[in-house]
Amino acid sequence: MRKLIFIGALLCTIAIRGHAQQVQADSVKNMSLQDCINYAYTHQDTVLNAALDIKTAEYKVKEVLATGLPQINGSANFQDYLKIPAQPVEASEFDPQAPAGKIVPVSFALRYSSTLAANASQMIFSPSFFVGLQASKTYKELSQRSYTRSKIEANVNVSKAYYQVLVSNEQITLLDANIKQLQQQLNETIQENKQGLVEKIDVDRLTVQYNNLVTSRENTLRLLVLNYQLLKFQMGMPITTYVVLTDKLESIKLDSLSDQSIADTSFYRNRIEYGLLETNQRLNELDLKNKKAAFLPTFTANGNLSTAFYSNSFGGLYTYNYPFSYVGVTLNIPIFDGGQRNNQLRESRVTIMKSENDMANLKNAISLQASSASISYINSLKTLDIQKQNRALAEEVFHVSRVKYQQGVGSSIEVTQAETDLVNADNQYIQSLYNALISKISLDQAYGRIK
């Protein structure tokens, strides 16, 4: 018996020390649930990438805005005619005495040429530019809402992981209490067996129960280490950091569902998923507007300032220059493209109709999700309340059966069964407690209360 107790304690110590060896003593952090959520907002990879998407959207707005500003480009050109092109002409045009019909090659180019130029253009009127500017700003709004969605998901995941750790700690506390009282009972039964007051089978029966409880505690300890690591993973924290949770289960309020929440029929607008679809709908409408703008003309001003150099010798190429320049305007009027713009317009209208259907479907899905979450939360609260009562009753039955056994009016089987019922009641209470906490998170998420 002492060897079993020693082995159980040794295994528990190894599990705890094994976890402690993974962390550094100087990286201990005391964190509440809100601390963990705030940490995830600034360290979780998905949230960080969503924040970077906002930066990308800001640069996209500036990129579109830049297309409406003057565009200036420079160019430089150099050519070396290894074989100077020639134009065939009649020799009589240059020499009246040449035979009629004689053809001679004449070159009008010099071997070396170079051109330096600066081109400038300015958009004067372009409907697509203004639509594109609106779309880029709406795209920025979409990225901001995506960032909010990432934060909500991080909040939910961290909260679930945090509660899992708290529930696991509570489970270990209950197991410790059961192990302590069962160990006391086992020691008393061993002494009674030595005195011939009880049979050996009573000792064996309690030993089996004790071993099962010790094994369950060891398994829970190992799962607790994993739960801590999962919490830190959801936070974006290195799993080698040692975290101490400061919130307690008794401080968590599991309030009853208010009638006001059920009566609110417009809560779906609080959901970030619906806001994302609304923003996508505006982008689709702007895309349709852009397709319509393609039917309108565009007006652009442009200018050029250039200078050219020519020579038959490379050394004298830049001796003389021949400048030229121009300014002008360009009016582009769409006339006929074989029906491409019309079909693109029809495609955009179909896309808008599909997004309207998606919004209607999401609205119904959110209502269904909220109803399901409400029912699950109410059921979990009822179940938790019943399991609390059952656990109290099981504990009372165990103490009564133990007193009866000690007074000689009860059997060891009755005590063993009462102990088994108490362990089962503890397990069901722990499970119902976790279900109530998770259903509370799901309820808040369904009604859009998590921001």
Image (cartoon, rainbow, N blue to C red):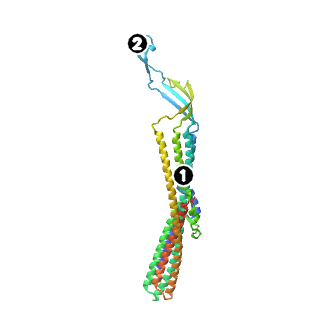
Q: Which residue is mark 1?
A: 278
Mark 2–mark 1 Cα distance, whole angstroms, equals: 82 Å
User: Is residue 97 rendered to the left or right of residue 165?
Assistant: left
On the image, the x and y values in percent for residue 3 come to 46, 78
On the image, the x and y values in percent for residue 141 come to 57, 50
Residue 387's place in the image compared with 327, above or below, is: below
Residue 93, can we see it? Answer: yes
Q: Which residue is mark 2?
A: 100
On the image, the x and y values in percent for residue 383 come to 51, 71
Residue 156's place in the image compared with 299, above or below, is: below
Q: Residues within 10 Å of mark 2 (few under 14, many from 20)?
A: few
The kind of residue tagged 1 is: Glu
The kind of residue tagged 2 is: Ala
Residue 191's place in the image compared with 432, above or below, is: below
Along the line of sight, which residue is nearer the eye, 39 or 433? 433
Along the line of sight, which residue is nearer the eye, 119 or 295? 295
- Foreground tag (2 vs 1): 1
